[in-house]
């Protein structure tokens, strides 16, 4: 269970550049929910995931993860409960380390790290098995440096790393946006397969409305740090791209109208 | 260069090689340029010299030096992580502070170790000649340090250190507190440097507050020489290259010192200039090469 109660975040607080990234967000996510998140640039999608992951401290409100109040937890501590894949394929993995060393780092997520050997023999069996399910042939390249892999391969590896230890929640932030269309759709396939097989609670940010409609059981639209649409189940399956666009332009119009009103 | 000078240079290379491993750990592995070493090398020398002068066993004195060096590294890392002072500046602050601390520890600018029992005496007791005993002991210590470092960087914790230097966002997402790792890594690095300083002092028969000047540049030069000779590869190769680089660097310096042209001769005081030029050269050669190949 994930609960965000009245989460707010402003950047450059009090300055002339002040932006409200998150504006009193309330969000309640049930175990097994697969939520797709859309919204225009700067709507606060990444900020929402960052607030959950603890990348920054929120200005107000509380965050609950797996039945625990994690509002005051630093990012590395919350990482025990969170699997993460970033937009930039370079962020999720270590280029100078081998595939198996990266996976060995991920297999200790949320546990202590001591002076035991990093990559253990029984790990390699698990790693091979997990990598084989990607169908990219990475299982035969355990000792290859990750810096030698393509963006798509690195993103697939990051997916495996994020889910090697079952996370309380999986956070995906436009994780296919930096890939070419063919690779992007492969990674997206992998994403839905993994989520279904492992019954992962997931928040997936995407700028692609048809992906947002095709995947997941719930859809959230953000605008200016607020949730302006939140549909689930049957209601979501009936939703079309046109509905989303209409909704999107309506919100733009509202702000446009209110700007006009302000200017008088 | 005489045979005697050559052996002496190899000995120095092995001794300072332990320091170079420390520099490799901060500069290359953690990506943390750490100048604390100019202060922690004499710190190790001072601590062990004073301990020995007070009747402590020479090997125990090495361990005390190691702990002192670790703490010095922790200070730099804490200044950087908790007080958010830029790493370079944080390390310069610790280095400067250590100058005063070292004089306090020695109650003066130096301590003589002549006539006391050092780590060399048990080996000499086997009846080996002095130079051979030193060479054997220092080779053994340097090898143990190198192997220990290679082993450490293959442990769970060691992998976290490697990842912290490579990609802090990634390793944070894997649940690691990068501050702790930086404190541990910079601490370990300075522990090695302090042991190196303690051995140098025991070998040359004195600890001196100024013996640390230029340590970081010599360390960097050695790392770069090693990488040039053995290439940049994995961690195992990197650690071995650091040690080999140190030996080659000291031999090259000894060769330079025996250089004479007419009335001109290189003096020990020229070494800092030569080393600085060497490091500048090594750092710029890749850029220059790249510029040429683009034409
Ligand atoms: N670290 C930051 N510092 C300053 N402003 C930020 C930061 N992160 C996000 N913002 C601002 O917060 C707003 C929301 O950003 P973000 O959550 O990244 O939007 P989205 O992911 O929906 O495109 C934007 O106006 C952005 O400029
Ligand atoms: Mg974003």
Image (spheres, coloured by chain):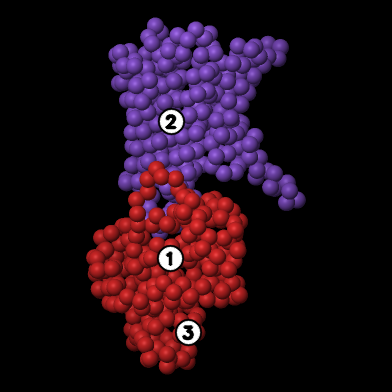
For image coordinates 53% across by 51% down, the residue present is: A97
Q: Nearer the viewer, mark 3 or mark 1?
A: 1
A196 vs A40, nearest the viewer: A196
Mark 1 surroundings: few (<14), some (14-19) or many (≥20) residues within 10 A: many
Dot 3 corresponds to which residue?
A214
For image coordinates 61% across by 18% down, the residue present is: B254
Mark 3 surroundings: few (<14), some (14-19) or many (≥20) residues within 10 A: few
Dot 1 corresponds to which residue?
A163
Q: Image check: B206 left or right of B263?
A: left
For image coordinates 58% across by 23% down, the residue present is: B250
> Both on one chain, marks 3 and 1?
yes
B124 vs A95, nearest the viewer: B124
Q: Is residue B109 above or below residue A91?
A: above
A109 vs B204, nearest the viewer: A109
Q: Is residue B195 above or below residue A102?
A: above
* Circle 1 chain: A
Mark 2 surroundings: few (<14), some (14-19) or many (≥20) residues within 10 A: many
Residue A11's image quarter?
bottom left
Dot 2 corresponds to which residue?
B192
* Circle 2 chain: B
Image colour for chain B is purple
Q: Is residue B139 above or below residue A69?
A: above
Q: Image check: B206 left or right of A15?
A: right
Residue B23, percent across and down?
48, 35
Residue A8's image quarter?
bottom left
Image colour for chain A is red
Local SS, label 1: helix
């Amino acid at each position: 269970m994930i609960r965000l109660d009245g989460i707010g975040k402003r950047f450059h607080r009090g300055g002339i550049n002040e932006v409200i990234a998150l504006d009193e967000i309330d969000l309640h996510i049930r175990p097994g929910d697969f939520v797709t998140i859309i919204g225009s640039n700067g709507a606060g999608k990444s900020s929402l995931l960052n607030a959950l992951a603890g990348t920054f401290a929120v200005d107000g409100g509380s965050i609950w993860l797996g039945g625990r109040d994690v509002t005051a937890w630093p990012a590395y501590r919350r990482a025990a409960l969170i699997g993460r894949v970033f937009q930039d394929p370079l962020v999720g993995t270590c280029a100078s380390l081998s595939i198996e060393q990266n996976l060995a780092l991920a297999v200790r997520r949320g546990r202590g790290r001591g002076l035991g050997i990093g990559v253990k023999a029984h790990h390699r069996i698990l790693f091979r098995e997990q990598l084989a399910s990607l169908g990219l042939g990475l299982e035969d390249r355990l000792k290859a440096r990750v810096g030698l892999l393509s963006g798509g391969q690195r993103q697939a590896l990051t997916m495996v790393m994020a889910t090697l230890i079952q996370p309380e929640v999986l956070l995906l932030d436009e994780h296919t946006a930096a890939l070419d269309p063919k690779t992007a759709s492969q990674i997206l396939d992998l994403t839905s397969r993994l989520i279904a097989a492992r019954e992962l609670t997931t928040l997936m940010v995407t700028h692609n409305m048809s992906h947002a409609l095709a995947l997941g059981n719930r859809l959230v639209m953000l605008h200016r740090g607020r949730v302006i649409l939140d549909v689930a189940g049957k209601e979501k399956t009936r939703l079309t791209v046109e509905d989303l666009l209409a909704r999107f332009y309506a919100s733009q119009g509202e702000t446009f109208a209110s700007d006009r009103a302000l200017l008088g | 260069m005489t045979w005697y000078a050559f052996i002496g240079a190899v000995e120095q290379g092995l001794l300072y090689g332990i320091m170079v491993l420390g520099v490799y750990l901060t500069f290359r592995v953690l990506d943390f340029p750490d100048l604390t070493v100019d202060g922690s090398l004499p710190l190790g020398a001072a601590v062990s010299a004073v301990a020995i002068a007070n009747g402590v066993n020479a090997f125990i004195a090495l361990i005390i030096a190691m702990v002192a060096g670790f703490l010095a590294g922790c200070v730099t890392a804490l200044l950087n992580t908790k007080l958010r002072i830029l790493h370079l500046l944080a390390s310069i602050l610790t280095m400067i502070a250590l100058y005063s601390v070292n004089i306090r520890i020695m109650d003066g600018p130096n301590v003589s170790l002549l006539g006391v029992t050092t780590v060399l005496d048990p080996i000499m007791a086997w009846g080996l000649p002095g130079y051979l005993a030193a060479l054997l002991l220092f080779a053994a210590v340097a090898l143990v340090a190198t192997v220990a470092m290679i082993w450490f960087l293959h442990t769970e914790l060691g992998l976290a250190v490697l990842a912290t230097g490579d990609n802090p966002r990634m390793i944070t997402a894997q649940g690691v507190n990068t501050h702790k790792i930086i404190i541990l890594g910079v601490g370990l690095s300075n522990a090695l440097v302090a042991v190196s300083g303690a051995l140098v002092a025991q070998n040359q028969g004195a600890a001196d507050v100024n013996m640390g000047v230029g340590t970081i540049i010599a360390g960097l030069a050695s790392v770069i020489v090693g990488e040039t000779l053995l290439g940049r590869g994995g961690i195992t190769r990197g650690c071995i290259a650091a040690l080999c680089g140190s030996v080659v660097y000291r031999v090259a310096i000894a060769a330079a010192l025996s250089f004479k042209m007419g009335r001109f001769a290189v003096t020990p005081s020229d070494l800092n200039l030569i080393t600085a030029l060497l490091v500048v050269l090594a750092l710029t050669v890749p850029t220059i090469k790249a510029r040429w190949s683009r034409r």
